[in-house]
Image (cartoon, helix red, strand yellow):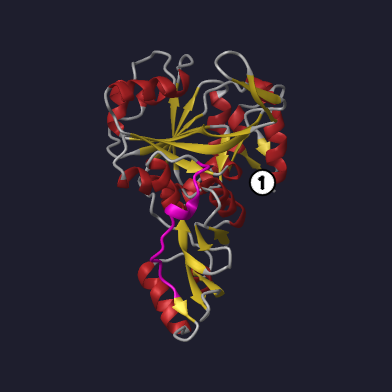
Amino acid sequence: MEINKKQSLKDALKKMSIEGKKCLIVIDDKKKFLGTLSDGDIRKALLKGKNLKTLIKDFFNSKSTFFTEANFKESDAKELFQKERFEVIPVIKKNGEILKILEWTDYFGPKQRDNDLKGVPVVIMAGGKGTRLKPFTQILPKPLIPINNKTVLERIIEPFHFSGANNFFLTVNYKARILKAFFEELEPDFKVNFIEEKKPLGTAGSIKNIPKKIKSSFFVTNCDVIFKVDSKEIMNFHNTNNFDITLVASTKEITIPYGVCNTFKNGQLNNIEEKPTFDYLVNTGLYILKPELLKLIPKNKYFDMTDLINAAKKRKKKIGVFPIDENEWVDVGQWEEYEKAKSRLE
């Protein structure tokens, strides 16, 4: 749970993902306590235009709360956790080193199901043919392909429902009757509304037909991406920054499998960089939209989410990016990733 101040934002995101934490303890080379770094601190840095290679030293909270070894009491820690809702509180030795790290779960146990997203609509775009997953999708619609003991669709819905979401919209076209029959048999304790496309309308075209009674921001997700992120955190980020659209983007490291030649303007070789790596934030297919954005979608015309984002940008709408680590989601829309998902989601 500790991270050196000389490490990067990317290192911090990866460590949070691997350890399942939202906050890290920042230390120096001598392992002395310096402060804390939360996932919110990382997002603030990225919103300021910093990239993932930026060092965390200028973005962690150097005024974070801690106990000294001398003044630490269990009763005080529990009271402070309950009052401030901290993820972690370190206990520091006299020499500045960390004695131990207290966590919320030490006092209140694992996170329980809540209702923070109750009433928040979730739109799942489930109308595609899933051609990359043939021959499975010649028999089943892509959302009903099994990953171990659950369908893709169930795995998409579960984290939203765990946070209280109970109103789901499925845009359907290919094998729509099978999808409807599945939910009739399942008898879920949440509402499922079907929006039928008479023809393929793209990744945004079908959501034009969502009932106009939706008055608050809502989630939109592809039906072949499964996330291990807290959807409440994304909604809080969206609302706090008053974004019109928020898209969830994942870190992605790309390695060029060759030596790259860097040249001067006259064509002379400067150097050869052997198998360089580059870091990007890639779109995952999970979004939050304000309902006003539906006005930008043409009716009964093919319209992708990228078209909607471009239309919003032209109108000076505010668009945010919520970064996650590449280990916090899986794309099951192609065979190679589907096979990986079966082992990752056991």
- Place residue 239 in its image quadrant: top left
Type of secondary structure dominating the magenta stretch:
loop
Q: Quadrant of residue 20?
A: bottom right
Whether residue 193 appears in magenta in the rendering, the answer is no
The residue shown at (48%, 52%) is 56
Assess disc 1: are there few (<14), some (14-19) or many (≥20) residues with their C-alpha within 10 Å of its C-alpha: few
Q: Position of residue 35 (x, y in %)?
A: 46, 64
Quadrant including the N terminus: bottom right
Q: Name the residue carrying label 1.
A: 345
Image quarter for residue 206?
A: top left
Where residue 245 appears, as percent x and y from the top left, is 36, 34
Question: For this view, does 94 lie left or right of residue 211?
Answer: right
> From this viewpoint, is residue 189 visible?
no
On the picture, is 68 further left or further right than 238? right
Residue 82 in the image: state x and y as whole percent.
39, 72
Which region is colored magenta?
Answer: 52-66
Residues 76 and 123: in front is 76
